[in-house]
Image (cartoon, rainbow, N blue to C red):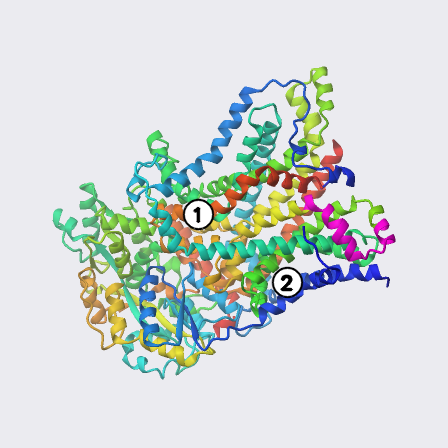
Amino acid sequence: MFHLKQVRAKALSAALAAALLTSCAAPPAEDEVTLSFFQFKPEAVKEFAGLIDEFEAANPGIRVLQNNVPDPDTAIRTLLVKNKTPDVLTLNGNASFGLLARACVFADLSQEPAARDVLPAVQDILNANGRCSGSEINGLPMANNASGVLYNPELFAKYGVSVPRTWDELIAAAETFKANGVAPFYMTLKDAWTTSPALVNLAAQLQPEGFFDRLTAAGADRNTSPVSFSRDYQEVADKLLQLFHYAQPGAAGVDYATGNKAFADGKSAMYLNGSFAVPAIRAANPDARIASFPYPVTNNPGNVTVVSGVDVVLAMGRDTPHRAEAQKFINFLMSKDVIDKYAKNQSAFAPIRSAAPQQDTALRGLASYFTSGKVDGYMDHRLPPSIPLVNITQQFVLDGDKSRYLNTLDNEWFKVAARMPNRGDQQ
Amino acid sequence: MTHSTKAFYWMAVPALLLFVVLHTIPVVTGMFFSLTDYAGYGKWNFVGLQNYVSLFKDDRVLASYGFTFLFAITATVIVNVLALGIAMLLNARIKFRTAFRGIFFIPNVLAVLIIGYVFNFIFSNSLPLLGQSLGLDWLSTSILANKDLAWLGIVAVSAWQSIAFSVILYLAGLQTIPAELYEAAGLDGASYWRQFSSITFPMIGAFFTINMVLALKGFLQAFDQIVALTNGGPGTSTESVAMVIFRGGFQGGEFGYQMANSVVYLLVIVAVSVIQLRTLQRKEADF
Amino acid sequence: MTTTTETASSARSVTPARGLRRRGRLSDRVNWPLTALAAVLALTVLIPLYLTVITALKTPDQLGGSGFEWPSRVRLENFSDAWNLTNFPRALLNSAIVTVGAVVLTILSNSLVAYAIARNLHKRFFKFLYYFFVAALFVPFPIIMLPATKETALLGLDNPVGLFLLYTVYGLSFNVFVYTAFIRSIPRELEEAATMDGASTWGIFRRIIFPLLTPMNATVGILTCLWAWNDFLLPLVILSDPATRTLPLAQYVFQSQFNTNYTVAFASYLMALAPLLLVYLFAQRWVISGVMRGSIK
């Protein structure tokens, strides 16, 4: 039982209030600087932990605290709502990043030494996504990905299938595998986002020129818009569905991680994913046989492009109190050695001029497209993050209801356009 | 003011202040920001009632209310029927009663999120195998991946976890019933069902009311189990209101808009609770 | 909530065993069919737990079947792997800090507030206070989620201390409700006699009321403990520093980083569930009667 003196009892009732104050006070009195480092990629936690060790060893007095959370786009905004912008962050170079950059959450990195080495085309894509003001650079690309079809060369050789260069060849290849009792693709529909690599590639090559620009210009009025998903995404939806018809039984309950393992173990001939899946596949089975080719979406091989985006953007909190240390860390992460090493280990494409070429056999089929600039951006980066695109797409490939799918996309697009014309972070 | 009155104020006022700071002010600021286009950071503008207008046109939000109610009502009914049954079972002349009661309460001490992960594995891996060997089509793929059945998986896990609490409340209620009532009824030759409907149920009416209200209120706020089981999928078919607010408010950057959603949600919950209390209490009085 | 009114004398004599005594003794014959039914129902609780335990003990290659098979080879490294990967000791400590803090602070403060309210319900201010706290029971958490996240960070409370403070404050709604009902059943004569002897209001609370509240304190303590230990959403939005993650949060993060590693994942679930499960197994009678009492009052 608690025995309290009368005076202390009084203090107790005020203790609640006191707790408020005490927890505000007492900042850590250390001469060491700790950088908060928001790192969005769960599969790269170990990689960055190693890099941090290296950096800390070379820079005594700076500690870096890696923070990896599920659902990073939500987590980063939770931190922003709290006014706790991390000192340094990695994010995917998607629409959400663009919105945050436009809201002036990130510092200008245009004067950093590392910025000069970045491939201009890649930096342009990122800048076009959104930035605080005209001359700023709010994020530096650390690694690029490329979305393509991964395949198992052993199975291709065994059944005499050559790498498809047109849509018809792709379907023919799928039929051949199916006829031989081999799953053509391994689908992982439990994770909604894994429907997106196929979608973005189909969209990139099939949607009309300037689709999103025209859609954006149409404002909130669906009826007068010159373009719409219902009108212009018919073929995209058809072909998407056609691909997902080849899903193995029970695909709806299979998650990405299981899919990686299955593909690594040779349970399917192809895998609709991208460079970013390669390390995870190899982690599941170090002997996995992986090669790649770009999505042949039409029957004209000349149309083929690779969808590529900035997989890892480095950014710095605009008002970080540890500016010098954060800059040091960013320039370290952007150094040629680190980028080369990261690209090698994470099967990424290095977005800097001085980088070593990507030698990975798994990516050879995509690499030439990347270097020769036959590259498209991610269509989903043009959609506001409040539209749950991947979930809507997941629903579509499960129920196959095309008109509802496209109608939902239109509906979401114009709904959001109507309620965000002058939203805070849209300016 | 006397010494003792002063002491009473000293006891209550600090708590009131803290409550106002940590609960009331957030409610009020939330209501205020529902009238803005605030993203949670940065600049914001007044938009009047526009968020509320958009809300009623947003089928994703409306669907989340539909799902939440379907889920909450189903789960509440299932939980209460089963809990009452189990409570009566535990109150009957069975052996190992204490041990059984101990076992039935276990799920209630476990974290819903982690339970959700365990059941996720069962639904995705174990049950499909069972379904395949029994030749049951609907069971041979994960029911969590089926947009028509996924919500039932969530109901099952929620019920599994929360039945225990209701059982305990009903047991407490059953033990307030004097044994003489049953003895008299037994002498009159009343059937089990008759004893239940004219003695047991009326006598625990208050417990029934409180169980129904607490369960419905709890299920209307479902979040953890959905994160662990379906994360709102497949598609957006199992997004609860709480989940839409969390995701849209943070990830979507629509803080102001989701605050409008929250205000509507508050009104809905208050209305439901009041209606529920009224009708159930009237029922209680009827017995 | 209450149709039963208990007097203080019976309240004081409440023992855990009271609620357990079987109702009526028409006959002591055991009803075996019902016992069998109870056993079958108990399996629905035990089977998932069984599955958790055996999966945590297996090697990954034993996962092929339906999952219910007994492990042919036990791999205890699952636990050490999970221990390291989730930073288990740290998360356990955080959960313990939050839970112990919430329970202690809630019992000490909420009973005090309820005492002040229960003894002054005839005064407008306290009556208002009572309804003000209780009305908040109907305010769903999502409405305060976004603003409270912002505000606690602003106040520097986005840490375990802030978290247990929030549990204490948010708990007021329900706890004031149950404590007040209980305190009002305690006759005032005791306090009046103590006042005659010169005891202050604080002294009366400490020496007379608080000890009488012991069964209610147990109830409130248990419910607060279950809430704070198992909660996910509040720590998810409130805690900023990854080093302060509680056990459910650690599981959430673990899930996204190592989600194929089922055997290690289950070992980690089991370790996260174990502490409270063990406490429960030892204090089972006490926990259940505590919860029951909360409902009768």
Percent position of residue A331, x then y: 33, 78
Residue C169 numbered tag: none
Neighbour class for label 1 at 10 Å: few (<14), some, many (≥20)?
A: some
The rendered magenta stretch, by its main secondary structure, is classed as helix
Tag 1–tag 2 contact (CB < 8 Å) = no
Marks 1 and 2: same chain? Answer: no
Q: Is residue A207 one of those drawn in magenta?
A: no
Q: Nearer the viewer, residue A371 or C54?
A: C54
Give the residues in magenta: C192-216
Secondary-structure class at tag 1 = helix
Q: In the displayed structure, would residue C49 be above or below residue A33?
A: above
State which mark lies toward you, 1 or 2.
Answer: 1
Secondary-structure class at tag 2 = helix
Residue C271 numbered tag: 1
Percent position of residue B84, x then y: 61, 32
Q: Quadrant of residue A72?
A: bottom left
Residue B22 numbered tag: 2
Query: In the rendered image, is residue B8 in sight?
Result: yes
Q: Quadrant of residue A337?
A: bottom left
Circle 1 marks a residue in which chain?
C
Q: Is residue C43 left or right of residue A400?
A: right
Q: In the displayed structure, would residue B216 be above or below residue A415?
A: above
Can you name the residue that lies furthest to the right here? C196
Q: Amino acid at mark 2?
A: Leu
